[in-house]
Image (spheres, grey):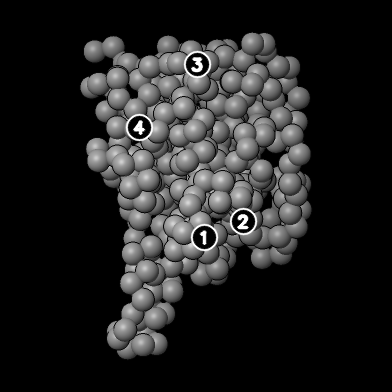
Amino acid sequence: MEKKSCYINGIGLISPQRTFDQEFLAEPLEYVDTILHCVAPDFTSYINPAQLRRLSRMLRIGLSAAIICLRDAKNENPDGVITSTGYGFLVDTARFLTELLTQHEKQLTPTYFMQSTYNALGGLVALYVKCTGYNTTHVSKGFAFETALWDAMMHLQVNDSLHFLVGSYDEADPVLFAVNSKAGHYKLEPVRTLTLFESTTTGTLQGEGAGFFFISGQANEQTWCRIRDTRMMYKPTEAELTAGLQDFLRLNAMSVADIDVVINGASGDVMHDQFINGLCDAIFDQVVQLKFKHLCGEYCTASSFAVWMGASVLKKQQIPSIARSNQSSIKTPIKTVLIINQYMARNYTFVLLTSG
């Protein structure tokens, strides 16, 4: 059976950069820190103030990103809502558990519990758009966002007239930072984010963000790009990763020469980046390469930032200088973007985006 097309017809992204107003890294923000937090918009532009006061910070960010996406798509009637996260709402989870212990399980605040569940954002978005259709949340660490994309794409193979609001969220939590720092996953000394890839130490920056994408089976005037395919690989060897990429391109009837831009998910950790940098330098040395985790930090669903970047490159036909990691000549028009992401050197993913 011929694979049906899937298109991104709307995007809403809130991240440590000013992305909520669809600016494409014209004035990138630099931090000197180990943790990157989202640059929040004026929430009252998207959420009723009466409702706003009852929502946690991350729910505000997630719902606002969803509304931005729906407005961009000019369609507030999705057939389903699919969300994804690596760890969920850790701050509210910690608040609930702390209250559970300190108050000996008596007179607990229900808000912390309700806003700490993994599907809290998916339910909130569905209530906002009055969507009674398909609603699920994927919680699979470094594969969470790609799994959500795959879920929507499989639905569209059955019925390409449907529209899905696909989102991701993860927050920078102090406890998660402390735990992962002991494992060597985060840097302990502040670094200048825009020169992150000059670092020669282990560890990366903790980041966060919420991104939503309006995925449809048909293109329209709002279309950003086409999602051609995606693949996930868990703990591959270097040889397996290379073979997996070559097979991925072959199955999509493409070669290295057909790729105009590669987005490299290196994180600034000299240990975790070995495979992905080696792969990109060996195979795509003549292709324009971009990096993005110095802009948003590392988190389970950071690949949603990469998809936003790739879609923006294809729609705007621009290459942000702050993201370039080599000086290969730019092909015009830009037709194909390949995202190669890694999370903690365990989860490796490929996402292929094209202009049509």
Q: Earlier in the sequence, mark 4 or mark 1?
A: 1
Crowdedness of circle 2 by 10 Å Cα count: few (<14), some, many (20+)? some
At x 46%, y 41%, the residue is 66
Q: Earlier in the sequence, mark 2 or mark 3?
A: 2
List the residue tagged with mark 3.
221
Q: Nearer the viewer, residue 92 or 195?
A: 92
Residue 169 is tagged as none
List the residue tagged with mark 1.
57
Q: Secondary structure at mark 2?
A: loop
| Callout 2 amino acid | His
Residue 77 is tagged as 4
At x 67%, y 60%, the residue is 34
Residue 355: x and y, percent?
52, 15
Q: Are marks 4 and 1 in contact (CB under 8 Å)?
A: no
Q: Is 329 placed above or below 230 here? A: above
Separation of marks 4 and 1 at Cα, in angstroms? 25 Å
